[in-house]
Amino acid sequence: MRHVAVVLAAGASRRLGQPKQGLRRDGETMLHRAAGLAISTGAQRVLIVLGARSGAMAALVADLAVECIDNDAWEEGLASSLRAAARALGDFAIETPVLVLGCDQPALEAGHLQALLEGAARAASGCAATAHGDALGIPAVIAAAVWREAEQLHGDRGFGAVLKRLPVETVWRLRAPELEHDLDTPADLIAATARGWIDAP
């Protein structure tokens, strides 16, 4: 499937107390790892949306073929990063699905992303998302027709509510409980380290 990828990495990780983008798994920073996974899907373009500490974060992926964009409104929340990505992609995304992922799911693997892309290719809506309980979240593949709604997103919400409005049978769902573990708090970090998903300090 022809697609582009957007890696969300603008947050300040205030609850965690340290930049989650710089945490390491197998010696590789989480941001570098997420960017590498996005590249491995064969995306035509890979955008990294940065905000807090943007210069330091950009340095973490300086060796990769990615485009770093600054989201000056990053403190508003997730929606602002998606709007920034939409503006950067411009007309490029009119016909092209967008793979959206973060850098704080330590169990994320290339197989998850490939399954989402394959599922989206079969789905009537062209969309695929990860099931987080009853909610739909990232990583996700957003069809071009749905991606056009990015400019209408606000606050700390992404495309989850938009996808929930679509007929349930038209959106392919990835069931991967391991992806419900993210890195928001010190307790999350302790749990991920214990599972071997994050390198011990």
Image (cartoon, grey):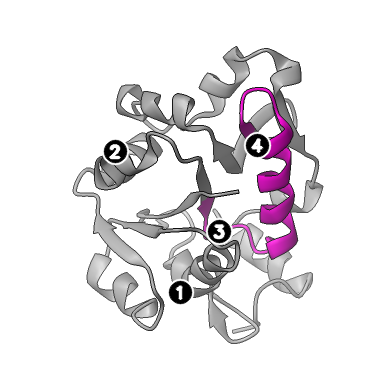
Residue sticking out furthest to the left: 72
Residue 131 horizontal/vertical position (percent): 72, 35
Mark 4: few/some/many CA within 10 Å (<14, 14-19, 20+): many
Residue, disc 4 = 129
Residue 11 horizontal/vertical position (percent): 37, 53
How many marks the image carries: the answer is 4
Q: Is label 2 or label 3 in front?
A: 2
* Residue 159 position (above or below residue 14): above
Residue, disc 2 = 91
Q: Is label 2 or label 4 in front?
A: 2
Task: Tell me which numbered mark, 2 or 4, is placed earlier along the sequence.
Answer: 2
Task: Tell me which numbered mark, 3 or 4, is placed earlier along the sequence.
Answer: 3
> Mark 3 is on which residue type?
Asp
> Mark 1 is on which residue type?
Gly
Task: Tell me which numbered mark, 2 or 3, is placed earlier along the sequence.
Answer: 2
Q: Are the residues at dot 1 and dot 4 in contact (C-beta closer than 8 Å)?
A: no
Q: Please state the extent of the stretch shown in magenta in the rendering.
A: 101-127
Residue, disc 3 = 104
Q: Is label 2 or label 1 in front?
A: 2
Q: In this view, does 133 lie to the left or right of 147?
A: right
Look at the numbered disc 4 and give the secondary structure of its residue. strand
Q: Which mark is residue 22?
A: 1
